[in-house]
Image (cartoon, rainbow, N blue to C red):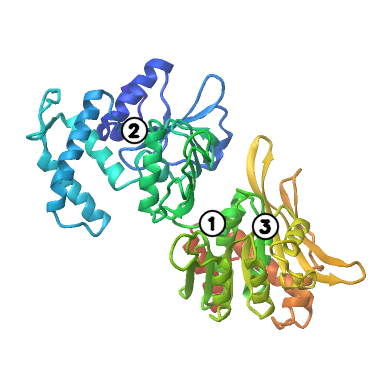
């Protein structure tokens, strides 16, 4: 195997004996090795039969493998207990550590807990040269080889500090969603390779139920037969929905996790991906500078929250932002950010989105952001907009027509004559184009208002996506109601049409950032905010 191995992989193999054993077994079976890559790139999506290995933090590696049928598989490579004897040793070490733990100071942080595990592990384990079977006696230290100690210490930390069998998936930055339906069916949605089955298993239904019970308690959302469905947030911010009872989930206990990105995707990344154009982004920039209400609407997994987060740096830096969510997903870069979360049923004093939005009206924010509007809180959002508080939100509807139908029907019941308090709707969708799933802004529409003559709402399309060319077409050039009638006068333009020159300038700034590969969310935010303070002179490049 040595001749086929890159220098980076040699270093990884030296530190991780389980990886060496896995690759040797794989080569014997398939006659080849995966390509080791420290990072994935989006152009790998075009690979006809990917066979890639990438690290997500020692000792875990991910192998994306295409089988003989052309199906892609996601294999987490981590230390595992391979024999019944190793499993007995793991339990013996764990039992011995739990006996000693009450006599140690209670750890306050994750780092302190890790140090305590190292300390207790050293007290209960003795390293031996050759493999020894575990005797029936419980007294004395547990004899382990170096390889067994390496495996067992990792697994104890994984199960106590981490999230157990899911740890590889939580660590992997390229995963969007995780779907577990019963103990032996774990699939995921990969950012590059889409939906794939994994080798992650939870034993039997009893083990999975116990795992979910522990997980629910850790996140403060206990599950039981009486309360079988809960939503919660993992320590890394990922969103989890648990369905605990086999009466409800017929294929066994199940759960779904929506991964949380530590740093949001920037607007320049979305432009680079083709999700939207620099003109759309420049249009949103001007709208958010001047307090327009914008909702991002689309079907499930269309990237609504990603786009919402990406556009937030366009709000002036000194603004006060108020967010109201069921699960914290909106990430605001501003210093004055009041982040509020609902409190679930079953707890003392339930607080829902309706309550949070009513509180927002007394808080005098410059912008109110609602993670997702689904029910009666939509009416309060319109009250907020009517009283001069611009609102940003995501909404579940595939078109502006459907959005208006849902807003004016039960349970939201916004009067149709109030709909023009919402200025702009961005429709986003996951589209299948030339064999690839892509996220695209299909259209940006302005809401002019209710007209009695037609007994309906008049909207105006400013941007449309052309599926043939994969381009975003600016239909609103010299025809934008929001830019000319809502913003130009406030912005001090003598000729309302001059505002299109400002839009073109900001599109050039964004294009230049993409050209210079300025994709970091915080760096992009800084450039936009510096532009607010000092104009073109503040830019770190020439236009």
User: From the viewer's perspective, is 144 left or right of 276?
Assistant: left
Number of residues whose C-alpha sits closer than 10 Å to that of mark 1, classed few (under 14), some (14–19) or many (20 or more): few
| Residue 14 located left or right of residue 164 | left
Badges 3 and 1: C-beta atoms under 8 Å apart? no
Q: Which residue is mark 3?
A: 297
Whether residues under marks 1 and 2 lie with C-beta atoms below 8 angstroms apart, the answer is: no
User: Measured from the top left, where is residue 335 in percent x and y?
Assistant: 45, 74
- Whether residue 167 is visible, yes or no, is no
Residue 516: which disc?
1
Q: Position of residue 304 (x, y in %)?
A: 61, 55
| Mark 2 vs mark 3, CA separation in Å | 44 Å
Q: Secondary structure at mark 3?
A: strand
Q: Residues within 10 Å of mark 2 (few under 14, many from 20)?
A: many
Vertical arrangement, residue 344 with respect to residue 528, above or below: above
Closer to viewer: mark 2 or mark 3: 3
Near mark 3 (Cα within 10 A), the count class, few <14, some 14-19 or many ≥20, is many
Mark 2 or mark 3: whose residue is earlier in sequence: 2
The residues bearing labels 1 and 2 have C-alpha atoms spaced at a distance of 31 Å
């Amino acid at each position: 195997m040595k001749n086929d191995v890159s220098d980076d992989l040699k270093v990884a193999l030296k530190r991780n004996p389980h990886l060496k054993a896995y690759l040797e077994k794989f080569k014997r079976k398939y006659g080849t090795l995966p390509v080791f890559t420290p990072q994935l790139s989006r152009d790998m999506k075009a690979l006809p039969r990917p066979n890639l290995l990438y690290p997500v933090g020692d000792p875990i590696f991910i192998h994306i493998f295409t089988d003989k049928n052309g199906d892609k598989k996601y294999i987490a490579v981590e230390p595992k207990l391979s024999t019944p004897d190793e499993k007995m040793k793991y339990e013996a070490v764990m039992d011995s550590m739990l006996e000693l733990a009450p006599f140690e100071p209670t750890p306050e942080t994750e780092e302190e807990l890790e140090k305590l595990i190292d300390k207790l592990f050293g007290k209960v384990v003795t390293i031996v040269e050759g493999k020894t079977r575990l005797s029936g006696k419980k007294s004395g230290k547990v004899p382990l080889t170096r390889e067994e100690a390496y495996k067992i210490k990792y697994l104890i930390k994984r199960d106590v500090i981490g999230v157990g069998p899911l740890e590889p998936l939580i660590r992997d930055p390229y995963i969007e969603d995780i779907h577990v339906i019963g103990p032996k069916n774990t699939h995921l949605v990969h950012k590059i390779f889409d939906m794939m089955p994994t080798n992650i298993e939870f034993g039997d239904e009893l083990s999975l139920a116990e795992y979910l019970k522990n997980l629910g308690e850790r996140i403060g959302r206990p599950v039981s037969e009486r309360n079988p469905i809960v939503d919660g947030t993992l320590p890394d911010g990922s969103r989890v929905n648990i369905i605990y009872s086999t009466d409800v989930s017929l294929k066994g206990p199940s759960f779904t996790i929506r991964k949380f990105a530590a740093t949001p995707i920037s607007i320049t990344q979305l432009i680079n991906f083709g999700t939207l154009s620099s003109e759309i982004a420049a249009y949103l920039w001007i709208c958010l500078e001047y307090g327009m209400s914008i909702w991002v609407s689309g079907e499930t997994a269309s990237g609504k929250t990603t786009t919402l987060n990406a556009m937030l740096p366009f709000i002036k830096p000194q603004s006060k932002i108020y967010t109201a969510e069921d699960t914290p997903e909106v990430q605001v870069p501003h210093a004055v950010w009041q982040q509020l979360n609902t409190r679930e049923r079953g707890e003392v004093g339930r607080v829902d989105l309706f309550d949070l939005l009513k509180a927002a009206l007394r808080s005098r924010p410059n912008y109110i952001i609602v993670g997702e509007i689904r029910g009666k809180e939509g009416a309060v959002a319109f009250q907020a907009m009517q009283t001069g508080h611009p609102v940003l939100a995501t909404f579940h509807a595939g078109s502006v027509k459907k959005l208006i139908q849902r807003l004016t029907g039960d349970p939201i019941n916004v009067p149709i004559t109030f709909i023009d308090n919402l200025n702009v709707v961005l429709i986003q969708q996951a589209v299948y184009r030339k064999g690839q799933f892509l996220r695209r802004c299909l259209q940006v529409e302005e809401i002019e208002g209710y007209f009695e003559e037609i007994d309906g709402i008049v909207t105006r399309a400013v941007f449309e996506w052309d599926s043939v060319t994969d381009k975003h077409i600016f239909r609103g050039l010299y025809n934008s109601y929001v830019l000319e009638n809502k913003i130009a006068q406030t912005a001090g333009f003598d000729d309302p049409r001059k505002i299109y020159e400002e839009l073109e300038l900001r599109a050039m700034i964004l294009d230049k950032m993409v050209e210079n590969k300025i994709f970091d969310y915080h760096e992009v935010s800084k450039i936009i905010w510096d532009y607010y303070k000092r104009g073109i002179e503040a830019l770190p490049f020439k236009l």
